[in-house]
Image (tube, helix red, strand yellow):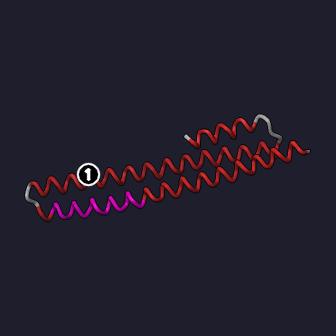
Amino acid sequence: MKMRMMILACALALTACSNNAQQAAEDAAAKAKASAEATKLKAEQTAQAAKQAAEAAQQAAQQAKAGDVSGAAASAGQAADAAKNAQTNAKDTVDTAKQGVQDVKDATNKAADAAKQDTQH
């Protein structure tokens, strides 16, 4: 939601800016969009890894119930690996989102500075 608000703010800034400020605002909007897309991709990867972990855990439980100890152990190992992957992906998602917010903040500040310079000339 914050990304959408930033994109909207950048779009509104475009209407009142000169070329330099307009370009800076367009850059900020592009960075907001790229950040949102990167974060979405990372979140999808996290969800996929979590789904794999859940499926492997369910398979381990079924195998254990059926008395297949070695199969259950193997599936439990797969579940643990997938859970670790999901954890890593979740951290990457957070890091990607944080970097995106910083990039958009920097670009928005640059656009604001450009707009200030335009009004001073």
Are there few (<14), some (14-19), or many (20+) residues within 10 Å of tag 1? some
Q: Quadrant of residue 25?
A: top right
Residue nearest the observer in this picture, 68 or 6: 6
**Left or right: where 62 falls relative to 54:** left
User: Does the magenta segment cover residue 120?
Assistant: no
Which residue position holds label 1? Answer: 55
Q: Give amino acid for label 1.
A: Glu
Residue at left offset 53%, top offset 51%:
38
Q: Quadrant of the N terminus?
A: top right
Mark 1 falls on what kind of element?
helix
Residue at left offset 37%, top offset 57%:
86
Residue at left offset 65%, top offset 37%:
8
Q: Main secondary structure of the magenta part?
A: helix
Extreme residue in the left direction: 67
**Left or right: where 92 falls relative to 9:** left
Q: Quadrant of the C terminus?
A: top right
**Left or right: where 4 falls relative to 74:** right
- Residue range (magenta): 71-88
